Image: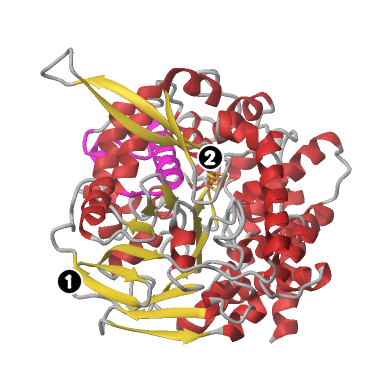
Amino acid sequence: MLKHDTLRNVLYINLSKKSFQIKDRSDLFEKYIGGAGVASQLLLEECPEGIDPYGPDNPIIMAVGPLTSLYPLASKTVAMFKSPLTGNLGESHAGGRSAVSIRMSGYGAIVIQGASERPCYLSIQGSKVFFRDASSLWGMGKSATVGKIIRANEPSSGLRTIMRIGRAGEKMIPYACVTTETYRHFGRLGLGAVFGSKKLKALVVSGKRSIPVADQKQYKDLYESIFKNATESPVMKKYHEIGTPVNVIPLNEMNGLPTRNLQATQFEHAQTISGEEIAKNYLGKRLACSHCPVACIHIAAIREPYEDEPFFYKTSMICYDYELIYAVGSMLGGSHVPGMMKLIDSIEAYGLDCMSAGVALAWATEAFEKGLITEMHTDGVRLVWGDYAGYQEALARIIEQPNEFYQALAKGTDFASSIYGGQDFAMTFGKNEMPGYHTGPAAHIGYLAGARHSHLDGAGYGIDKKIAANKSITAESVASELLAEERWRQILSSLVICFFARELYKPDVIIEALKLSGFEYTEESLRKLGEEIHTAKFRFKMREGFSFSNLRIPGRIYETPCTAGMVDEKFVRTALETIRKDVEAKIYDCS
Ligand code: SF4
């Protein structure tokens, strides 16, 4: 690492004591680069074994990497914590201005420990940390309003990020998210609930430091080449123009779009909820995370008349992605775009993870249809596919929790189905609600065996396309491909690069960029490190009770046709066993 690089600084904040200190942790950054690599070590250091995820001992760790603020699309922050949803590794990535602000404020990582007695928010301004009272913000309806108030009250020098929770986080719903810059989220695995358990309403970080590089001329050349590749790449062009919802039509055509709680993989209204159609009729603007020339963030402008003034309209600006359209569109059998957008808007206002909320409502709808639950459970709400008025009512009750059914649903799909039945169609993997791809066995093996139980761990949907074309691919080779991809992604997550740019950041580019920041790596040493970080994450997971043998696999995945045909149970179990042996051998080797 270069001598004057402040990446080495870790800011430790204790909310119980209202104190903070800055430590030089060159030891961690030299060895694990940053991002996921450093955060997983800090998690092992700071999170005592077996703690309550809602207790004060659960640390919130946020980390960035050496390329943050220097190169295009190195725009993400990694958050790590013990997940209240799964009970083991909580890891979530977000962009917005979060990464650049943390790096420019002079830190490679921030660790938040303890819990405040009263609602508070933290304002980190370079080397100063202020503990602000947030009593008047607690319980506020919209997280966007919270952002507005904080924006007006905090100094704005330098780059600034405002991360905050909504009512779902305050109520410690285990799939509550943290919103940053209104339209980006630490969405998955319940970081919002951990904020809520600490009475931490928001985290503001601002700074204006500069970042050193070893050679200005080489840096400029490398920057320009990455920038050129990013702006000329056809994939990036596609994400800029239509956004990730460009995937709705192809997934539907290839039998991969989960529909009505995965009872089908082709949705008759896919065209209506496609990225192309929404862009044509509703696109209001595009936005980008800091330091990203792609701008894949798409915002719909939804216009509706005021009830008492029919010729006066209010316009809501609502962010949509593929995963959101899948979760509250096809998964709920809904095709009324304004209704779908307003449900996304409500989920956003409450501060819930949209994927988990959509999958929970999808399970509840099928459970209602099958008579496992009735209007007595739903407090009179009729859950019917595609009926957004009913979904709005159910969503409000997930927050308010007026009865035992909603208390259970607020704990997640896995928990609710363990009480009310329907586990075969409770679409969770490792207790995390499923992403929007039913492309074949590799996708599901990836959700089950990935450290985050996410489609972003090993990208199994890409492997499924190969399985669809070549049926002789073995379960063992799928297992080893998923593991190799997930281990390489630990390097991207340590830098921390947006995964959309993974084709731009090939090993040679990463090695050169790291060299200009004072890190010496070869492709071999990077791959070895990726493996080590992956193992560290599983060491934490297993320490906290994760076990491959206890994974519940929803039977529905074997019943619904997918891109690769039908998913074969034996294939899935063989691949899982191969991954288990590999992961456990590495943990055993290192201990
Ligand atoms: S491609 Fe999209 S998500 Fe990735 S950094 Fe750019 S704007 Fe953010």
Magenta region, mostly helix, strand or loop? helix
**Of labels 2 and 1, the one closer to you:** 2
The amino acid beneath tag 1 is: Arg
Which mark is on residue 118? 1
Asked whether, in this view, residue 459 is left or right of residue 312, the answer is: right
The amino acid beneath tag 2 is: Ala
Residue at 57%, 36% (x, y): give it.
Answer: 244
- Determine if the C-beta at disc 2 is less than 8 A from ligand 1: yes
Q: Is residue 167 above or below residue 584?
A: above
Q: Position of residue 124 (x, y in %)?
A: 33, 70
Q: Residue 364 is drawn in which quadrant?
A: top left
Residue lying farthest to the left in this orientation: 308
Q: Where is residue 108 in the image (x, y as percent from the top left)?
A: 51, 73
What color scheme is it? secondary structure
Q: What stretch is highlighted in magenta?
A: 351-380
Q: Position of residue 574 (x, y in %)?
A: 77, 57
Residue lying farthest to the right in this orientation: 472
Q: Is residue 545 visible?
A: yes
For disc 2, the marked residue is: 295
Q: Mark 2 or mark 1: which comes first in sequence?
A: 1
Residue at 47%, 79% (x, y): give it.
Answer: 10
Residue at 34%, 42% (x, y): give it.
Answer: 347
Q: Is residue 306 above or below residue 257?
A: above
